[in-house]
Amino acid sequence: MIYKCRNCGGNTIYEPSRKRMFCPHCESLDSENIVREGSLTQCGNCGAPISPGQYESAGRCSHCGSYLIHDERIGGVYEPHLILPFQLNKEMAVQRLNQEFRKKTFMPAGFLSRKSLEKMQGIYVPFWLYDYQTHYDFEGEGTRVRVWTQGDTEYTETSYYHIIRQMEADFDKVPVDASFMMDDGEMDLMEPYTYKELEDFNPKYMSGFEGEVYNQSAPELEGRAQGKVRDASESLMQRSLGGYNSIRPGRRNLNLHRNGICFALMPVWMYLYQYEGKTWRFHVNGQTGKVTGKTPVSKGKVVAYSLTVMLSVSTIFYLVSAILSAL
């Protein structure tokens, strides 16, 4: 599948800043036609052979540069239920990287160069979203300590309480990424997303970006979702137990009931930077602009800075010595 402009025949793409389909060739808006030509092995625009990755659902033809959406991988069991369209285009994502890292003293000179940042790519990452109802029974012993002074004597009173708590909570759209390409920890740091902007799946939002089908099934990843719900439930319970000096837990029983699963595509800008034989990965949330990643350190800049500091200290020492000698 490829989206072509009705006016000039160019490849139309979804432009986040306009929230509309856009033809970069003639600058027409919403002029797209769906052309269902080509296959997983042939570009639907120029007819050149293509070799999409094992999980690729959308990509770009290396010959003509057209953005292709592979029908076979967005239908049937691979059809997403929901999609969160990109809110940030590449220019906005680059701006967020600059805001986050431009003040880093020791980053390599080429890290934020236009040539390097041109390689940044927008990707629709596959996520499973789980819905849970929970019931948490907690029983334990709490203490409250009162200290007071009467005359020269300090008194301490410790009161003991039998604590019983019952808590029910709903957790909607607990996200777990289903991509081998993406680091799970990095994708967790991409949260939170604003789920009210999720839309029913429409492939037009994928034109202009890369995309993947899920690499792992919902049952395979449910343990991660349950772990998130357990941690969140524990945090909520602890917040409800305020007012005690100490708590000794007794019985804990958390029941989870899953009442929904859906497959969604979430927007992420990915920037890969090669430095000293290592690949450094950075991600920008395509909706909120949240940035993750740690910049490499230029050894040359560290050495230069150290020499500058040493020279400055030596100069100050020389001046102080000269002043003292003149007294």
Image (spheres, grey):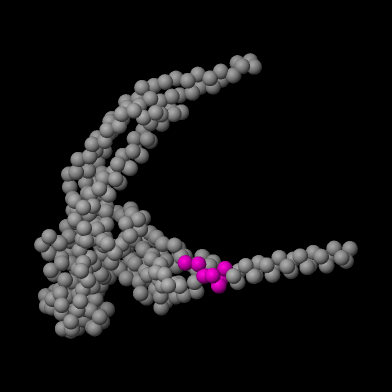
Give the residue drawn at x 39%, y 21%: 161
In the rendered image, residue 158 lying in the magenta stretch gets the answer: no
Identify the residue at horizontal 53%, vertical 67% (top origin): 106
Quadrant for the N terminus in the image? bottom left
Q: Classify residue 71 by image quadrant.
A: bottom left
Residue 14 visible (yes or no): no
Q: Is residue 222 above or below residue 36?
A: above
84 or 75: nearer the viewer = 75
| x and y percentages locating residue 245 in the rendered image | 46, 28
The image position of residue 238, as x and y in percent, is 37, 35
The quadrant of the image that shows the C terminus is bottom right
> Residue 171: which quarter of the image?
top left
Q: Residue 299 in magenta? A: yes
Left or right of 238, for residue 211 = left
26 displayed left or right of 91: left
| Image location (x, y in percent) of residue 148 | 56, 20
Q: Is residue 138 above or below residue 52?
A: above
Q: Nearer the viewer, residue 195 or 27?
A: 195
Range of magenta residues = 296-302
Q: Position of residue 167 (x, y in %)?
A: 28, 33
